Amino acid sequence: MKTILVTGGSRGIGKAIVQKFAENGYNVILNYNKSYEAAKAIEDNFKNVRIFKADVADKKEVQNMISFANDTFGNIDILVNNAGIGCTGLLQDVTYEEWQSVFDVNVNGIFNCTRLVLPQMISRHSGKIINISSIWGMVGASCEVAYSASKAAVIGFTKALAKEVGPSGITVNAIAPGIVMTDMVSSYSVEEFEDIRKQIPLGEIGSTQDIANSVYFLASDEANYYTGQIFSPNGGWVI
């Protein structure tokens, strides 16, 4: 039975990913930082899910999490770097602390988790790393410069690492979702959602399950020949 570690797995896209893999028989380590009750509720529903609190921006906490995963289920076969935070506002109004916080979680968090999982994957000559970026990492978003820049960094990280670890039998891919119904967009008004919907050729806002399905494919044997690729389930919003 394979083991998957999902960061930021208690809510939104992360929760859907955890549930998808748990329902299909994987051992799942669900990482959370603040949402204990939400994480615990998921753990209580699945015998094959274990939760662990860690701030992915803190390398010591990440090390403790990796050790917990190894002690609980053995080697980590799949790493999903999903944890992320947003930052909205004019660039001139974004504080240094806000900018740093976004990069600490969205970029440094991926570095910390990946760096500490890689040695075991390299030693086994197998493993899959799936990074969650964003459509804004591809094309940028006004008033979301920090978030867009961090998610663009995730794309660069993915492509470079895929070249580096491909000879070690490890695949590295990224998913760059379009707009998805999560807490991150809960502040949008009905009018804003309707305006976005009209811009999407398929005419629908994405669901967390859409993203979970993409992750599940990339983690499967059917995706063994994909690496360094950026998949963007966005309904045709960006083509």
Image: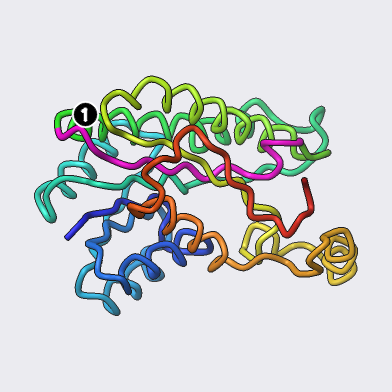
Mark 1 crowdedness (10 Å alpha carbons): few <14, some 14-19, many ≥20: some
User: Is 190 placed left or right of 208 in the picture?
Assistant: right
Image quarter for residue 216? bottom left
Is 130 inside the magenta-drawn segment? yes
Which residue is under mark 1? 122
Q: Position of residue 82 (x, y in %)?
A: 47, 48
Please give the range of residues in magenta: 124-139
186 up-or-down from 78: above or below? below
Q: Position of residue 160 (x, y in %)?
A: 48, 22
Seen from this angle, which residue lies furthest bottom? Answer: 45
Residue, x 44% and y 57% (percent of image)?
A: 217
Q: Looking at the picture, tell me which residue is in the foreground, 34 or 41.
A: 41
Residue, x 50% and y 31% (percent of image)?
A: 107
Residue, x 29% and y 79% (percent of image)?
A: 45
Q: Amino acid at mark 1?
A: Ile
24 up-or-down from 27: above or below? below
The N terminus: image quadrant:
bottom left
Q: Position of residue 150 (x, y in %)?
A: 60, 32
Q: Looking at the picture, tell me which residue is in the foreground, 167 or 107.
A: 167
Is 3 inside the magenta-drawn segment? no
User: Is 92 placed left or right of 86 in the picture?
Assistant: right
User: Is 26 placed left or right of 1 in the picture?
Assistant: right
Count of numbered marks: 1
Instruction: Identify the secondary structure beneath mark 1.
Output: helix
